[in-house]
Amino acid sequence: MKNVNLQSVKAAAEGVAAVAVLVAVLTIVGEMWFPLKDLLTNVFMHHWLGKSALSIAVFGVVYQMRKGEYARTDTTARSIYLAVILSFLATAALIVFFVLHSLGIV
C-alpha cells in the first residue's frame, strides 16, 4: 500500500479514536452536569447536534494534524486497533453509565 494511503488511514483511525472518547465524555458529563447539555443546546439548537458538530470538528482537526506524519503498516495497524478498542471502551462506559443512571446509583 502506498505510504500516502497509510498516512490517511492512520490519521482517520486516530480521528475516530478521538471522537469515540469525545462522544462518551460529552454524553456522560452532559447527563451529570446540566450546564454542558444546556450549552450544547443553546449553541447548536439541540445537544445531539452539538455533539455531532463537535465530533466532526474534532475528527477534522485530528485528521489534518496527523495526516502528514510518516506511517508504516505496523503503526497504521496499531492506530486502527486503538480506534476499535477505544470505541468498545466508550460504548461500554456509556452502557455502564446508563444502567447505573437508570438504577438511580449515579
Image (cartoon, helix red, strand yellow):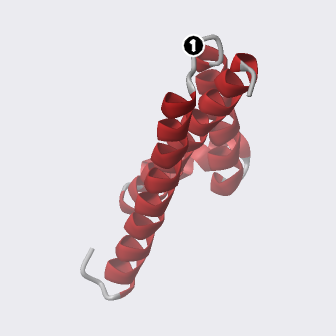
Q: Residue at x 49, y 29 (%)?
A: 75
99 sits to left or right of 105: right
Q: Furthest residue to the front?
A: 1
Q: Is residue 51 above or below residue 34?
A: above
Callout 1, which amino acid?
Tyr
Image quadrant where one finds the C terminus: bottom left
Q: Where is residue 103 in the image (x, y as percent from the top left)?
A: 32, 88
Farthest residue toward the bottom? 103
Q: Camera-side residue: 77 or 29? A: 77
Quarter of the image that includes the N terminus: top right
Q: Is residue 77 left or right of residue 34?
A: right
Viewer-nearest residue: 40 or 1: 1
Residue 69 is at least partly visible in this image: yes
Q: Residue at x 31, y 80 (%)?
A: 100
Residue 67 picture location, percent across and down: 65, 18
Q: Label 1 crowding class (10 Å Cα cut-off): few <14, some 14-19, many 20+? A: few
Q: In this view, does 71 lie to the left or right of 101?
A: right
Q: Mark 1 points at which residue?
A: 70
Q: In this figure, what is the number of numbered marks?
A: 1
Q: Position of residue 48 (x, y in %)?
A: 67, 56
* In this view, 72 is above or below 42: above
Q: Residue at horizontal 63%, vertical 22%?
A: 61
| Disc 1 secondary structure class | loop
- On the image, the x and y values in percent for residue 23 come to 53, 51
Residue 40 appears in which quarter of the rendering? top right
User: 45 left or right of 92?
Assistant: right
On screen, residue 54 above or below 86:
above
